[in-house]
Image (cartoon, grey):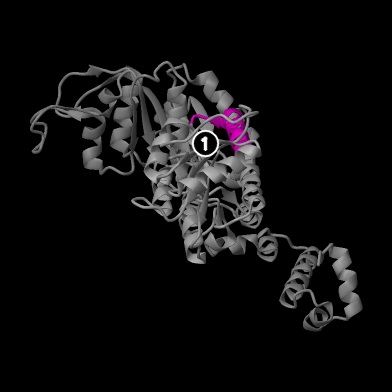
């Protein structure tokens, strides 16, 4: 049974608290204490009835006993997490142990308090929880604002180069003209193609994607154009191809640079005549399809090397869109990390809140050869490995740390000035020596083989904080 009566002087903007404890007298005592301090408080004596109540009403804070019959507090936390509820949970127990507290935290509890406790203890714990809830609410508002300002479909960005591409998409989406999207692997070429489709009047029709390099050449023609019964040994019935499937919508030809020469001729014919012929058929079928092609290759070079037909290249390249690599838009990395954390939390039911500043610095220093896809995979890996609610340095792969080392960075940059390079190396050696000696400057000077006075001068010169 849920005990809920309005207390005198209670205001509608007070924090709401649900107390879950099988000791009814204790629950009512706690209710009285909290009401005196302005909280709206409901009580229940079982975890199962609490879950029912949470299905009807949102609570800011939950105080839950660990040891209860039928469903204990840890089981409640598991069900609470599975139900996707959004309250801050504090566990209580008269039989507390460090192991139980750790287990409760892993399951999503904010804090753990041992019974019996004084009024001030529980009030202080609730105040800390309220501060956390306020921060989370502000973070959600900020994320929503970022989502509104910087999202275009599922593409997250604030870089000027990408925002310019968005403006181009808005201008050209309504036209049936072919678009060629270029960029390195992992830059999001298919997302751009989908954005073009979803911003056009074809959005309610099919978006069909095919990777031209993933299908064997002898099957690709049938896959694209379909076949009639008896066209070849396994053709036991008529089969429409992807062009017919995309009729009225958009066909995305990924890795168009891998298209065999014989099919390049047939694709050119489709673009010119807006009709396809199934394998083994004698008649054409009219299709209304918007073609978007993508490639990591430089098709201009492929044309010069006679590997790609020049006329087809010009027919595809009417409206070119080039996606910059992630290393050229590093301002997007924090936004993308935040986005991928939310997506991974939703998919894997994890509760990671963010990334430490040290870990973010490492990610910002990395060159990202695999671009956005590599970042997405790395964030998921880090979330699976982390033992806290943040992505930390120890969850990142070893290869990232070489990229973050200033010495490696300057050596890879092509810098030839001995003076500049020596200063960077000198500063790093001083920092390492001070770290190794826990800030003991005399010992650090000995390791560096310089005088104590020279070390003090260089610490000031490089602005090294001790």
226 sits left or right of 350 in the view: left
> Which residue bears the numbered disc 1?
59
Residue drawn at point x = 66 percent, y = 49 percent = 124
Q: Quadrant of the N terminus?
A: top left
Up the image or down, 149 lies above or below 109; here it is above
Visible residue check, residue 382: no
Q: Position of residue 354 (x, y in %)?
A: 58, 48
Q: Position of residue 120 (x, y in %)?
A: 67, 51
Residue drawn at point x = 62 percent, y = 29 percent = 8
Q: Residues within 10 Å of mark 1 (few under 14, many from 20)?
A: many
Residue 329 among magenta residues: no
Residue closest to the eye, 184 or 301: 184
Residue 145 among magenta residues: yes
* Tag 1 secondary structure: loop
Tally of marks: 1
Q: Quadrant of the C terminus?
A: bottom right
Asked which quadrant contains residue 418, the reply is bottom right
252 sits left or right of 180 in the view: left
Residue drawn at point x = 42 percent, y = 44 percent = 45
Asked which quadrant contains residue 83, the reply is top left
Q: Which range of residues does the magenta coloring cover?
A: 136-153
Residue closest to the eye, 441 or 432: 441
Q: Position of residue 112 (x, y in %)?
A: 55, 55
Visible residue check, residue 312: yes
Asked which quadrant contains residue 228, the reply is top left
């Amino acid at each position: 049974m849920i005990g809920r009566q309005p207390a005198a002087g209670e205001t509608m903007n007070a924090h709401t608290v649900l107390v879950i404890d099988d000791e009814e007298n204790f629950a009512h005592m706690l209710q009285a204490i909290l009401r005196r301090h302005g909280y709206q408080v409901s009580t229940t004596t079982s975890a199962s009835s609490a879950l029912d109540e949470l299905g009807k009403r949102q609570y800011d804070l939950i105080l839950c006993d660990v040891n209860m019959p039928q469903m204990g507090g840890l089981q409640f936390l598991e069900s609470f997490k599975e139900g996707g509820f959004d309250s801050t949970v504090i566990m209580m127990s008269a039989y507390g142990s460090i192991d139980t507290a750790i287990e409760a935290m892993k399951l999503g509890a904010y804090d753990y308090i041992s019974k019996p406790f004084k009024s001030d203890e529980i009030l202080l714990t609730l105040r800390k929880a309220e501060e956390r809830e306020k921060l989370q609410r502000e973070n959600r508002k900020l994320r929503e604002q970022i989502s509104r300002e910087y999202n275009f479909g599922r593409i997250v960005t604030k870089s000027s180069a990408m925002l310019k591409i968005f403006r181009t998409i808005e201008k050209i989406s309504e036209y049936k003209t072919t678009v060629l999207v270029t960029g390195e692997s992992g830059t999001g070429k298919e997302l751009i193609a989908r954005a073009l489709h979803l911003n056009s009047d074809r959005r309610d029709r099919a978006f069909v994607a095919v990777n031209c390099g993933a299908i064997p050449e002898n099957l690709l023609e049938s896959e694209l154009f379909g076949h009639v019964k008896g066209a070849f040994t396994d053709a036991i019935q008529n089969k429409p191809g992807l062009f017919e499937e995309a009729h009225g919508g958009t066909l995305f030809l990924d890795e168009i640079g891998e298209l065999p020469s014989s099919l390049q001729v047939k694709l050119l014919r489709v673009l010119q005549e807006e009709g396809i012929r199934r394998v083994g058929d004698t008649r054409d079928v009219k299709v209304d399809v918007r073609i978007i092609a993508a490639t990591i290759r430089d098709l201009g070079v492929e044309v010069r090397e006679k590997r790609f037909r020049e006329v087809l290249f010009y027919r595809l390249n009417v409206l070119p869109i080039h996606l910059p690599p992630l290393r050229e838009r590093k301002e997007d990395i924090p936004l993308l990390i935040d986005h991928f954390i939310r997506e991974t939390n939703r998919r894997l039911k994890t509760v990671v809140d963010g990334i430490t500043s040290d870990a973010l610095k490492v990610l910002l220093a990395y060159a990202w050869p695999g671009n956005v896809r590599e970042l997405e995979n790395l964030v998921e890996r880090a979330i699976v490995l982390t033992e806290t609610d943040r992505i930390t340095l120890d969850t990142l792969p070893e290869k990232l740390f070489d990229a973050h080392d200033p010495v490696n960075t300057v050596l890879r940059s092509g810098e030839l000035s001995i003076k500049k390079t020596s200063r960077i190396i000198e500063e790093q050696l001083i920092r390492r020596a001070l770290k190794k000696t826990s800030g003991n400057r005399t010992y650090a000077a000995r390791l560096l083989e310089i005088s104590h006075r020279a070390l003090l001068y260089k610490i000031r010169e490089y602005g090294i904080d001790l």
